[in-house]
Image (cartoon, helix red, strand yellow):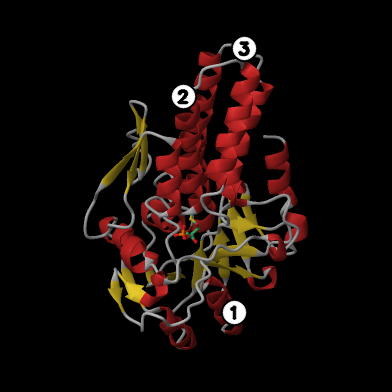
Amino acid sequence: MKNPKVPFSPVEFRKETLYLLDQRKLPNREVWVACRTSRAVWKAIRHMIVRGAPAIGIAAGYGLYLGVRGFRGGRYEFMQELSRQGRYLDSSRPTARNLAYALERILNRVCLSRQDHIVDLKRLVLEEARQIHLDDIVLCRKIGQYGSRLFKRGDTILTHCNAGGLATSGYGTALAVFYALKEKKIPFSVFVDETRPLLQGARLTAWELSRSKIPATLICDNMAASLMRARKIQGVVVGADRIAMNGDTANKIGTYGVAVLAHVHRIPFYIAAPSTTFDLKAKTGKDIPIEERPHDEVRKLHGKQLAPKGIKVFNPSFDVTPAKYISGIITEAGVLRPPFARSIGKVKRLLEHA
Ligand code: MRU
C-alpha cells in the first residue's frame, strides 16, 4: 500500500500476502519478508521482523485474515476458528496492548455482523484489518500535531528505543512529534539512546532520522545522565507498549531509568501513544505482563559472542515507568496531564464508544 502521508510503510498487504520490512536487518539491508499464513505472521512478531506496539497490532490483524482465509464450514465453526487464531496470534508477544486490541476489534466486528456467508465474513476480517492499518496513520499524525506544540525552536529532545514509522504504520508516535516539528520548519535536534540489547535506537531510530534529515546524535544508554546535568536536553519523548488506567506505562527496558533521570533534572518526560495502547483492564503497572526475551540477546551482539557462554542473564524486554514521573501522555485526543486517573477518562471514552 502506498500512502503519501507517511515517510515510508513497514507493513504492506497485497495479493493475499503480508509484506514486512525485516527490522532485524536494518540499517544495513532493506529486506522484505512475505507472510502467507498466520503461523508466518506469529513467527515474524515473535522474532521481531516486525516490532513496535502499533505495527505488531497491524500485522496481527492481517495475520488473523491469513489464518481464516482458507476456512470452509459454517458461521459457528468460523467464529470458533477466528477466536482460536486470535488467541494464537495474541500469544506471539505479551506486552504490547495493540496486539490484543487489533484482534479483539476484528472479532467484535465479525461477531456483530449479520452476515452468514463465509466469504462475506472473511471479507469483513480483511476490511477491519485494513481499517486498523489506515486508522493508525491518522492517530499518529494527530499525536505528531499535539506533541509538536510542546517544544520550541532550538530544543534538543531525547528518545529511547524506536517509536517511529517502523514501529507503526509509517509515521510513528514519539517520532511523529519530530516529523511534525520538521514539517512546521521548527529547528530542533534529537539525542538517540542506542537501546541495548537489540539496539532499536542505534539501528532503527538513527536510520529513520537520518533518512528524514532530522539532526540526530546517537549516544550509549549510559550517557543521558551527564547530558541532562549539562542541560543539553530540554525534553524526552518515548513511545509505549501498554498504558494502565493510572498512567503507569510499559515501554522498552531502560525507559524507567530515563524517566527518573528526567525527573531529577526537572526535564519534561512525555509518553506518545494512541488510545489503542491503553489497557482498560490494567488498573496499574502491576497488571502489565513483562516479556522476558532470549538470554543470548544480552550475551551476544549481532550474533557475535560478547560474554562467557554460560553466564546467567536477566533480559526483560520492557519496564514500567510509574505515572508520577510522566509529565504528559500525547494521544490523538490531546496531551493528557496528571492526575492521569482523571485525564485518561478521555481515552477511555474513545475506546468504549469505538
Ligand atoms: O521490543 P520492541 O522493539 O517491540 O519494543 C518497542 C518499544 O518499546 C516501543 O517504544 C513501543 O512499542 C512504542 S512503538 C510506537
Cα separation between marks 3 and 2: 15 Å
Packing grade of label 1 (10 A; few <14, some 14-19, many >=20) is some
Q: Quadrant of residue 324?
A: bottom right
Q: Of label 3 and label 2, which has the lower sequence position?
A: 2
Nearer to us of marks 1 and 2 is 2
Residue name at image x 39 percent, y 67 percent? 198
Residue name at image x 37 percent, y 43 percent? 6
- Asked if the residue at tag 2 contacts the one at tag 3, i.e. Cβ–Cβ closer than 8 Å, the answer is no
| SS category of the residue bearing label 3 | loop
Residue ranking furthest to the top: 117
Q: Is residue 195 visible?
A: no
Observer-nearest of 177 and 51: 51
In x, y percent, where is residue 137? 46, 41
Quadrant the N terminus occupies:
top left
In x, y percent, where is residue 99? 55, 46
Observer-nearest of 327 and 250: 250
> Which residue is identified by label 1?
260
Observer-nearest of 324 and 337: 324
In x, y percent, where is residue 223? 41, 83
| Disc 2 residue lies near ligand 1 with CB under 8 A | no
Residue ranking furthest to the front: 310
Tag 1: residue type?
Val
Observer-nearest of 94 and 189: 94
Q: Of label 1 and label 2, which has the lower sequence position?
A: 2
> Which residue is identified by label 3?
116
Packing grade of label 2 (10 A; few <14, some 14-19, many >=20) is some
| SS category of the residue bearing label 1 | helix
- Position of 145 relative to 86 (above/below): below
> Which residue is identified by label 2?
69
- Position of 123 relative to 117 (above/below): below
Tag 2: residue type?
Arg
Q: Is residue 187 visible?
A: yes
